[in-house]
Amino acid sequence: LKSKRYFGALEAKREGGGWLYVNHVPMDEYLTSVVSHEMSPSWHPEALKAQAVVARTYLLVKMKERTGKSFDVDTTTNFQVYGGVKKGDTGARNAVGETHDEVLYHGDSLAQTFFHSSCGGTLASAQEVWGRPVPYLNVQNSPYCSNAPVYKWQVKIPFSEIARRLNARGIRNVTVAERSPSKRVKTLTIATASGVKKIRADKFRTALGAIKVKSTFFGIARKGDALILTGRGFGHGVGMCQWGAKYQADERGNSYKRILDHYFPGTSLRRVAGYSV
């Protein structure tokens, strides 16, 4: 499909005036693809195994939540990245096989296993990002991703681009109004020709582009008719930091179980035979 190869069966059906393509794929093949697209298959086996457990748990939670829907998950970062067959996926395939049936639980329920590229040194809480507390997803120091290429970043954005993206005329300045407990930006104040308004930082990031504004962990400086954002990390910052997992495996020799304990404290690793949840 569109020059990509997929395992399993492909279903095509009309939906909303277009086509919906659904890949019916064995779970381990799906997970192999996710691990090899979310991390490099050449990364340390323990980091890959941590990703496999996180991806498997996440998938099972979504399958349960979306019972009766047209599909369980899509192929994008809205869920987790799935790209079909990827060459050189041996590391990912081994990680999935070596953690077969292993998932994270909190109490009697599957854990919420979110992940992101780089936390910038501080993990965010589920409460501050999504407004709902999760006991094992709190703010904590996590100084393991400083070698990540996205640990520090800077971008210059003209006011004209911000105005276009936010559909707001005459922008004069943008400042931080409030920060969350992890020091990420929570809300911004936007001064325009017609007055002042506030916007949530996550909506600002989405509007400007999540690749350009890599996280809400940033500071702001004005330079002429543009903003300079200087930030840290890439992604929402909740759960497992992928570059941090890599560092812990590479430099500290941590097992995938220890890596998972760091990012999801208070959860337990269990084997769920046949994925019966």
Image (cartoon, rainbow, N blue to C red):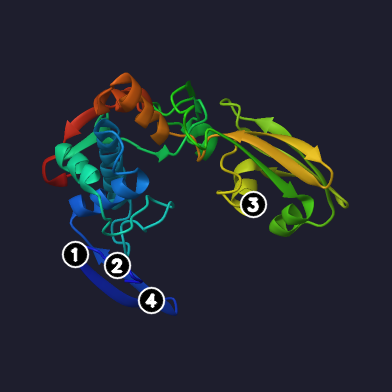
Query: On the image, numbered disc 1 is attached to which residue?
Result: 8
Q: Comparing marks 1 and 4, which lies closer to the viewer? A: 1
Q: CA distance from mark 4 to mark 3?
A: 29 Å
Type of the residue with mark 4: Trp
Q: Comparing marks 4 and 3, which lies closer to the viewer? A: 3
Q: CA distance from mark 1 to mark 3?
A: 37 Å
Up the image or down, 122 lies above or below 159; here it is: above
Please give the name of the residue rendered at 85% of the width and 54% of the height, measured from the top-left corner: 170
Say if residue 71 shows up in the picture.
yes
Please give the name of the residue rendered at 49% of the width and 34% of the height, measured from the top-left corner: 237
The x and y percentages for residue 264 are 35, 27
Q: CA distance from mark 1 to mark 2?
A: 10 Å
Q: Is residue 221 left or right of residue 73?
A: right
Query: On the image, numbered disc 2 is attached to which residue?
Result: 22
Q: CA distance from mark 1 to mark 4?
A: 19 Å
Q: Is residue 276 left or right of residue 147?
A: left
User: Upstream in the sequence, badge 1 or badge 4?
Assistant: 1
Instruction: Tell me the quadrant of the picture where the C terminus can be found.
Output: top left
- Binning the other alpha carbons within 10 Å of mark 3 as few (below 14), some (14 to 19) or many (20 upward) gives some
Q: CA distance from mark 3 to mark 2?
A: 30 Å
Query: On the image, numbered disc 3 is attached to which residue?
Result: 208
Type of the residue with mark 1: Gly
- Binning the other alpha carbons within 10 Å of mark 1 as few (below 14), some (14 to 19) or many (20 upward) gives few
